[in-house]
Amino acid sequence: MLRANQANWDARTPVHVASEFYGLDGSRTADDWFAPFEWTDLGDLSGRDVLHLQCHLGTETAAFAERGARTVGLDFSAAAVAEARRLADEAGRDVEFVRSDVHRAADALGDRRFDVIYTGKGALCYLPDLTAWAGVVSSLLRPGGTFYLVEFHPLLDALGPTPGAERQDLLLRHDYLGGRGPLRSDSPCTYTDGPPVTGATTSYEWRHGIGEVVSAVVGAGLTVQVVRETELLPWKRFPSMVPSDNGWWRLPPSEPIIPLLYAVRAVKG
């Protein structure tokens, strides 16, 4: 299943590069992908060693380099890493990109350790075993280092529109928690605009509740300092969403305020 996901992300990469979603034409900056609270939680990154796990095209990774960090991005897709390197070179950014499955990140990075490890916004759903993942994160952090996760809220993934209805009301239509095994998808479409994916269209996703995530992080020896939830998203997930004051998206005022994104900050003692 992990090999199928890797092939699928290799196939997605040219579609994502050609799409408008990531704003590679300059219409979006690296900062557009971050909520203001993220920079508050992360603090000054100047001169620090930052690792971005599951970085895809490096659109978010660039923001750490822009803040003066010595930055490494890691992803299992050879196609994505090649594009991330190209985009960084074209922009004149000093960012290193490493190709590796996150489960083997410690082997790929050798004895290197980091002050900050960042991941999220669509990353954890592709990992079957969070206990193993959290152990890798802990092993790559220096003592006193910070792990920061910003991820789509499991409630968001459980919501779906009313099939065939004129009003596209959002209801609980999918599992919030795991337990039924991975979800298999065979679709030529991704979350971006652009042409359909050709070739490897099969992928697998796993549901992870916040309790499972926090327990895995604590079990790896990290101390959780902050857990946040927000009603904002950096992109328009549902047609009914409206712009917020900071340019992100939220459900309209007529809908309940619910969490769509969450963040966890933890430190290694």
Image (cartoon, rainbow, N blue to C red):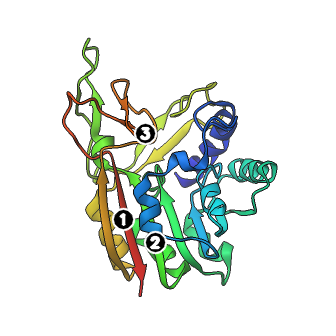
Residue at horizontal 75%, vertical 57%?
A: 93
Q: Nearer the viewer, mark 2 or mark 3?
A: 3
Establish if 149 lies above or below 81.
below
Report which residue position mark 3 lands on.
248
As helix, strand or loop, the secondary structure at mark 3 comes to loop
Q: Residue at x 68, y 80 (%)?
A: 110
Mark 2, residue position:
147
Distance (Cα) linking label 1 and label 3: 20 Å
Q: Position of residue 120 (x, y in %)?
A: 47, 56
Q: Is residue 183 above or below residue 219?
A: above
Q: Are marks 1 and 2 in contact (CB under 8 Å)?
A: yes
Spot occupied by residue 72 in the image (x, y as percentages of width and height): 66, 66
Q: Amino acid at mark 1?
A: Val
Residue indicated by mark 1? 264
Residue at the extreme front: 245
Number of marks present in the image shown:
3
- Residue at 58 percent of width and 63 percent of height: 52
The front one of 33 and 221 is 33
Q: Give the secondary structure at mark 2.
A: strand
- Which numbered circle lies on residue 154? none
Distance in Å between CA atoms under marks 2 and 3: 24 Å
Q: Residue furthest top?
A: 166
Q: Amino acid at mark 2?
A: Phe
Q: Residues within 10 Å of mark 3 (few under 14, many from 20)?
A: some
Could you classify mark 2 by the number of other residues whose Cα lies within 10 Å: few (under 14), some (14-19), or many (20 or more)? many
Find the distance from the CA under tag 1 to the CA under tag 2. 8 Å
Left or right of 209, for residue 61: right
Report x, y in % for residue 18.
69, 31
